Amino acid sequence: MTTRRTFLSFAGLALMPALPARTALAHGDEIHWPPITDTPSDQRYPGRWVWHELLTDDVTAAKRFYSTVFGWTFEAIGKNARAYTLVRQDGHAIGGIVARDGGGDAGRGGQWVGLMSVPDVGNVARFVQANSGRVIFGPKWLHGRGEIAIFADPDGAVFGVIRADSGDGDDVTGDLHEWVWAELWARSAYRTSKFYTDLAGYDADEVQRPDGSYAVHLVSGGFARAAVITSPRPTLASAWLRYVRVADVAATSRLIDSSGGKVVIAPAPGIRKGTVAIVVDPGNAPFAIVQIGAGEES
């Protein structure tokens, strides 16, 4: 197993839309879903975020944007509007794109949803329902993918879980233009972190941040998998923020601006020494980019 070292979060803000009520996931039994790893195995790492799905109103615009900014490539699974788009970076699968159904949700904006590996999706669903969360989708077995479900936690932050038929893939730090970190911006880091530690069996590790506040790292298998921080604006809805690794955060920010996206919080010396930015894609799906230097991972 390759080890990893996580990095501290930063103070900033991005508005994240609520997950649409209906998506093409509802038609999951109509296609053969690609596995989350190209090399099936029995490796499973409960608590690790193993997959990311983009829910968007405009798949074509999303593909054009992410291809330009990160060099991602795409593979259509299925046909017409209900096709699923597999995302690859450097030839291997890192996520998918799902077209939302139309109707009243149109124009509300896209969203990246992370899926956490769990041993029993049904048990998680029962836990969420018993602890003031909400089941949005599933549990459902998707042919070729495994069993998944999507939830909202007690404060409305959306996340997913999966028990993948293919196993979870290697437990390694994401390479360039891959997902490397997840952060939950919560109304209360301590209260919300307990929900996730009870849900997934995480250990909670309190870490002081550069601004003097604290984050709670969610630890499993000896590695921090994500952080929960108290949002600097707790009146806003809680939401997960996903990070993509880049070589040059300033140059990538400029490319995002010129490719149909928008930089919401630009890199600045006072925010993790200028190594991060919060951005949105053309469909208003927020995510973060991070430049990891030597010595910040092993």
Image: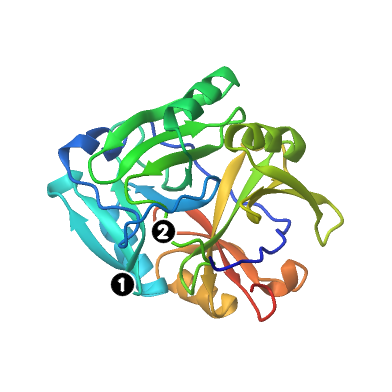
Element at label 1? loop
Residue at 72%, 43% in the rendered image: 233
Label 1 vs 2, first from the N-terminus: 1
Is residue 112 or residue 233 the one in the foreground?
Answer: 112
Q: Quadrant of residue 290?
A: bottom right
Task: Quadrant for the C terminus, please.
Answer: bottom right
Q: Is residue 253 above or below residue 52?
A: below
Q: Secondary structure at mark 2?
A: loop
Q: Does the rendering let one see residue 222?
A: yes
Rendering coords of residue 286 (x, y %): 51, 53
Res 169 label: 2
Location of residue 71 in the rendering, given as x and y in whole percent from the top left corner: 36, 74
Which quarter of the figure has residue 37? bottom left
Contact flag, marks 1 and 2 (Cβ < 8 Å)? no
What amino acid is labelled 1 in the image? Gly
Q: Which residue is most to the top?
A: 130
Of circles 1 and 2, which is in front?
2
Q: Nearer the viewer, residue 76 or 165?
A: 165
Tell me residue 47's x, y (percent): 55, 46
Instruction: Name the residue that disc number 1 marks.
Output: 91
Horizontal and vertical percent position of residue 140: 32, 31
Look at 34% across and 54% down and name the residue there.
36
Type of residue at label 2? Gly
- Within-10-Å neighbours for mark 1: few <14, some 14–19, many 20+: few
- Rendered view: 290 above or below 224: below
Count of numbered marks: 2
Q: Residue drawn at (56%, 80%), measured in percent from left and top?
A: 248
Is residue 128 left or right of 76 when viewed as pictured?
A: right
